[in-house]
Amino acid sequence: MKLLAISGSPRKDGNCEKMVKTVLELAEKRGFESDSILLSSTDVAPCRACGACREKGACVLEDDMEGICGKLEAADGIIVATPVYMGNYPAQLKALFDRSVLLRRKGFALKNKVGAVLSVGGSRNVGQEKTIQSVQDWMHIHSMIIVGDGAHFGGITHNPVETDELGMKTVRDTVENVCGVLELFR
Ligand SMILES: Cc1cc2nc3c(=O)[nH]c(=O)nc-3n(C[C@H](O)[C@H](O)[C@H](O)COP(=O)(O)O)c2cc1C
């Protein structure tokens, strides 16, 4: 089974990418295959609503989204790590989410994949929970199965994540929870 971790931050080597590293390490320890998408090194343009994906089943924009769709389709579990930008997730992630409408139009290709969210803010209580819920909305729209950290909503951390022991525990708990649910399907 394969776990895919997405970093929604445009910042290389930042907090989201560190959380993604934790996801990949834990997935490997549990015997899962893993893969990642780092939006710091990918090019995903916003959807132009041209309708080609509805009519032809393919996107006309030529960027990294085709490869990203392949990774999303190949995954059994998807964990999205996102920063809080002005109280929600960043535009780079919104572009990916909007463009993923193609997978919905391909017979709900993400249906029943297990999803969870990790969110990091500049400090505590700055919108991580709301940001998580916004990403979960995307997962619901794809008919995914959404899990949290086993007690609350997912991974909730603040900058810098290395000093946020409590927050990183919610990150690890979320990954273990996703792996545990996926193992039920094995
Ligand atoms: C455009 C922008 C908006 C931000 N808005 C918020 C915010 O509303 N609340 C907050 O606590 N931090 C905010 N931040 C800080 C980031 O959430 C924080 O630095 C986070 O750790 C970034 O994740 P990264 O290290 O993975 O890039 C913002 C940062 C940027 C660049």
Image: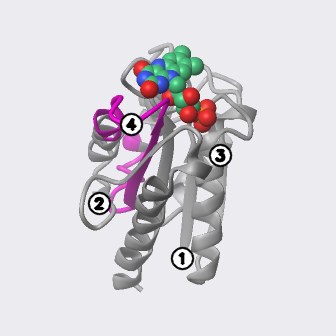
Q: Mark 1 points at which residue?
A: 1
Depth-wise, is mark 4 or mark 2 nearer the camera? 4
Split into 4 quadrants, where in the image is the N terminus?
bottom right
Q: What crowding class fits label 2: few (fewer than 14 Cα within 10 Å), some (14-19), or many (20 or more)? A: some
Q: Residue at x 56, y 25 (%)?
A: 92
- Relative to 32, is 90 on the left or the right? left
> What amino acid type is highlighted by mark number 3?
Glu
Q: Is residue 70 visible?
A: yes
Quarter assignment of residue 166: bottom left
Does mark 4's beta carbon lie closer than 8 Å to ligand 1?
A: no
| x, y percent for residue 106 | 42, 45
Tell me the element at label 2.
strand
Q: What stretch is highlighted in magenta?
A: 104-132
Among numbered discs 2 and 1, the one appearing first in the sequence? 1
Q: Nearer the viewer, residue 166 or 186?
A: 166
Q: Which residue is drawn at 49% across and 29% down?
A: 122
Tell me the element at label 4.
loop
